[in-house]
Amino acid sequence: MNKRPTLSLKSAAKPAAPKMRASHARELKPALQTHFQTSLKPDALAYSLMGAANAIAQVRTGTNLPLALGHVWSRLPEITPQARGAMQDISYRAMRQLGQSEALVSLMAPKAPEPLVSALLSCALALLASPDEPRPYEDFTVVDQTVTAAESHPDTARAKGMVNAVLRRFLRERQALLDAVLLQPVAKWNYPQWWIDAAKSAWPQQWQAILASGNSAPPLTLRVNARRTTVEQYLAKLSAAGLGASQIGPYAVRLDKAVGVQLIPGFADGDVSVQDAGAQLAAPLLDVQAGMRVLDACAAPGGKTCHILELADADVTALDADAKRLARVGENLQRLQLKATLQAADAQHKDWWDGQPYDRILADVPCTASGIVRRHPDIRWLRRKADTLQLATLSGKILDNLWQMLAPGGKLLFVTCSLWPQESEAQAAAFAVRHQAVRLDAPGQLLPAGGSGQDHDGLFYALFQKNA
């Protein structure tokens, strides 16, 4: 008999969540059922729905989505690449529509569902209320397979009747139910209320476009390796492979349709890397020259480190506090046949530093990541309002520490993927005053943008020079 894959999640609950009716107020805290075996087959939509629901329930307790999916996949020895892709697609859709889905469940369910049931309903509703036309699955298939998924797991089996009733009611009353919940800002925009308020405050003219951008699926953007080819040559290679693409930056190529990296011509050989077009601005702004000593602080996963080395023969140190993530920098360098010194250490301390100043420092500091939610839709549900101040304080300490390591006449590039001024412009202005730093030309705040000639996340750039 074949060993059956494991899908597991237990839950405990306690009151939380103001502004929800009492029966729908709970804080999700799962505990894994590692011994449960499911009979769902990997090629069934029910299998992918249950896996995605497991991941969503973990996100609602504080685990980021890629890590949660990794946990699910690690317990599924028979998972196929197709099922893995389906779980990822469903869970990302569910994250982008979570505010709407949870509002619908609150409206239709007689009482607050258990965490895994709630997550399963959110996954199903994300498919049934998908903005895509046509929707990715037939409505009756989604309902049938969601009920099948529910009855396959002991934490959801007793709720299969409720799951069936909720989804069938949604199909009968779809427009009326959507009209009702979309009166709620959290359901309309699919962000926590504090995030919506922060966007309105920071960007009173653009906040709606910013929030809408974060709910769109991101493009697959490549960075062409200038050491190996040109953008024009690489576009021709893509065309020959039947892949449409366009140039959206000096080294940036956006594919018309996302594909796996194994299908990208020349990826394994180092012709290109995956990197947002906005993030590709960092290395050119540093203006690194051959032989310079360069520090890339908070370097993982290494996109900017590699881009620096693609543009100049420099002595680069890639620093990151997370040794596991630093290993990814090494993997990227190896694929691109580039060399840098990898240093596992905290950028707010200097006990690792050899005392030799750097000519250039790239400080891509920790932040709320509010500018990259289209790539990481779980961030909005994981962050809390207080995180902005805490992360801005940490980033200020990192910048102050790194400034000591910069050679006179050297340049420091401050980068953050936040949209909140407290983490970006206010931070840059305060830093310049503290250190009498000369501020050079840089893009400043880039809001998320997409279009025929551009497509990038929300990032902030400030470039400083140290007086000689």
Image: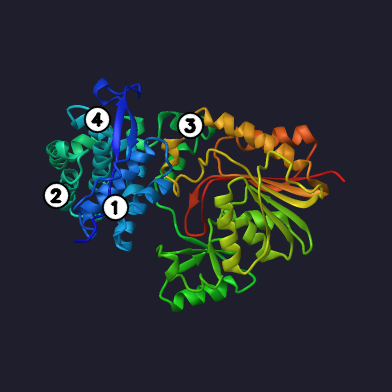
Of the residues under marks 4 and 1, which one precedes in the sequence? 4
Left or right: residue 269 compared with residue 12: right
The residue that disc 1 covers is: 132
Q: Amino acid at mark 4?
A: Ser
**216 and 311: which is toward the camera:** 311
Q: Are marks 3 and 1 in contact (CB under 8 Å)?
A: no
The residues bearing labels 4 and 3 have C-alpha atoms spaced at a distance of 26 Å
Of the residues under marks 4 and 2, which one precedes in the sequence? 4
Q: Quadrant of the N terminus?
A: bottom left
The residues bearing labels 4 and 1 have C-alpha atoms spaced at a distance of 24 Å
Q: Amino acid at mark 3?
A: Lys
Residue 238 in percent (x, y) is at 47, 74
Residue 199 in percent (x, y) is at 49, 34
Q: Relative to residue 453, is residue 423 depicted above or below?
A: above
The residues bearing labels 4 and 2 have C-alpha atoms spaced at a distance of 21 Å
The residue that disc 3 covers is: 200
The residues bearing labels 3 and 2 have C-alpha atoms spaced at a distance of 41 Å
Q: What secondary structure is found at the residue carrying circle 3? A: helix
Q: What secondary structure is found at the residue carrying circle 4? A: helix
The residue that disc 4 covers is: 106
